[in-house]
Amino acid sequence: MIKLRASRVELARLCPMSMRPGGVQSTSEPARMGTAVHAALAEYVMNRPFEFAHVAGQNGVSDLEELRILFNCGVSILKQLREDYGLFNDCWVEVYSQCSIEQVLALSGHADVMEVAREDAKTIHLLDWKTGRERKTSYDQLATYAYLILHDERLASAGIEEVVPITAWIRDREIEIGAAFTRENLDEWLKAMLADLNRDVFCPGHHCTFCPYNHTCEALNNKNKSALAIFRDLNPAEMTPAELAPIIAARWDELRHLEAKIKEVKDLVKEQVKERGSLPTSIGHKLVMETRQRKRWNDDELDEMLIKDGWTILDCDSCRSYDSKAVLESIKARAKQDKEKIGDAVKLFLEEAEECGALSYKETQALTEIKDV
Ligand code: SF4
């Protein structure tokens, strides 16, 4: 019997060979961070005390500050769901369920948060936290949870008829309420899913990044080689943008895949440079790790400071994302309007923001090429 977790269903549909038993699932820092954020939020939802350092340690996460920020984003989404929608005030977390289908496939999954709707005891609300930077559809994952819930004997006998999925995009502080899953529409989904899983083919693509076989898969290796050959033979300087764009668009998947491969290789080089101190490049330079200061804006303190300084809510909204560029552009525009020196205005603003805790700096390390003098 093939065992498939909800989080792996989408990959298995894209490439059925990815669900063979075995393979080595590597856990990246973002994946570990995602697990840690889920764990901290589960404690919060259930009103249980916890220590960030403990959760970080348990999940092998080193960036405590990032964990706190993502956790706080999740909390603000939960508050919004509780206050504005009246949801998830009485709920369960990390609900595990499993079931077997036709004695060939065992589906299982942990739903992040769920509750039975108060006004309609036939509906279950299902909340799924997403911590990734890339907004990836997770229809199959949500459909699997819904299938497991609606085929749970206890819930079926309690009269549950539908599951409403709610995706929380933590980094964007956004929620997305999906269409309800019912037994009828899930039967259609299951049919299509089983048809995809029954194919006996390798289908390499961008999704290979998440596959436990991606270090050894020959199909993927061949795809990478042909992608390299395509881009090596392309000469953009001899083509017009109108000629080039459709060729690149048609090869978009290969391009994304090469990018992922290059990132993987660069990460390996980074580790080596960290270990050895530096590495020479082919043009007589050297690669070193450079320490940089990264700005971090703290939303609530920044709002408070801006309003105290006479900014309008509209100004705050214009730099709502608080990436440093948006904030600085707003200050520059104001400085120009007031005929102030832009440099002075920016400097004063940053000093004030740092003082009141609206701005903090974090040291990051970046791989840099420098002249070997
Ligand atoms: S690496 Fe890609 S092609 Fe190979 S089994 Fe995994 S998903 Fe399929």
Image (cartoon, helix red, strand yellow):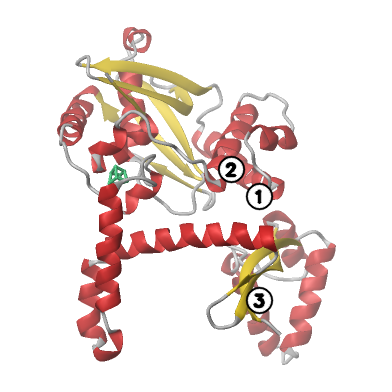
**Disc 3: which residue:** 328
Q: Amino acid at mark 2?
A: Met
Q: Residues within 10 Å of mark 1 (few under 14, many from 20)?
A: few
Above-or-below relation of 97 to 174: above
Q: Which residue is mark 1?
A: 66
Q: Quadrant of residue 314?
A: bottom right
Choose mark 1 or mark 3, whichever is in front: 1
Q: Nearer the viewer, residue 275 or 212?
A: 275
Quarter-wise, where is residue 83 in the image?
Answer: top right
Q: Give the label, 3 or 2, closer to the camera.
A: 2
Report which quarter residue 100 is drawn in: top left
Secondary structure category for the residue under label 1: helix
**Residue 254, position as x, y percentages in the image:** 29, 62
Residue 338, above or below 280: below
- The residue under label 1 is which amino acid type? Glu
Ranked by sequence position, the earlier of labels 1 and 2 is 2
- Judged from this view, the residue extending furthest toward the right is 355
**Proximity of marks 1 and 2: CB atoms separated by less than 8 Å:** yes
Please provide percent x and percent y for residue 32.
57, 40
Please give the name of the residue rendered at 22% of the width and 84% of the height, measured from the top-left corner: 242
Q: Which mark is residue 33?
A: 2
Asked if 60 appears above or below 259 in the picture, the reply is above
Quarter of the image with the N terminus is: top left
x 78%, y 66%: residue: 353
